[in-house]
Image: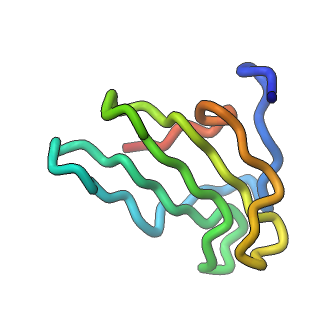
């Protein structure tokens, strides 16, 4: 497990949320799909699984092959702006 103070590695240092959606109807986003390197392709995926408005699981797909290399509890030091 990653230290909660440690920022996990992504493809880049920028963040553009491609998707921020409310999937359970509570009015708050609970799925974030983001591009961190400016190529327009998602490489950072985050999920709020307990409906508290905070990221519970973060996955990073460094080579963008559809299989995440990193899966951590929490936001991995990358909280969404929303």
The x and y percentages for residue 27 are 16, 45
Q: Residue at x 71, y 38 (%)?
A: 72
- Against 13, residue 67 (above or below) is below
Q: How is the image coloured?
A: rainbow
Q: Residue at x 42, y 40 (%)?
A: 48
Q: Residue at x 31, y 48 (%)?
A: 29
Nearest the viewer among 57 and 78 is 57
The x and y percentages for residue 59 are 67, 52
Q: Quadrant of the C terminus?
A: top left
The x and y percentages for residue 42 are 61, 71
Nearest the viewer among 71 and 34 is 71
Q: Quadrant of residue 74?
A: top right
Q: Quadrant of the N terminus?
A: top right
26 vs 17, left or right, is left
50 vs 42, left or right, is left
Q: Residue at x 60, y 35 (%)?
A: 75
Q: Quadrant of residue 64?
A: bottom right
């Amino acid at each position: 497990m990653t230290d909660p103070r440690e920022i996990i590695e992504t493809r880049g240092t920028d963040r553009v949320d491609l998707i921020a959606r409310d999937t359970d109807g509570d009015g708050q986003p609970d799925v974030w799909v983001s591009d961190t390197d400016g190529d327009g392709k998602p490489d950072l995926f985050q999920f709020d699984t307990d409906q508290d408005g905070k990221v519970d699981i973060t996955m990073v797909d460094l080579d963008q092959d559809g299989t995440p290399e990193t899966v951590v509890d929490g936001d991995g030091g990358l909280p969404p702006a929303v």
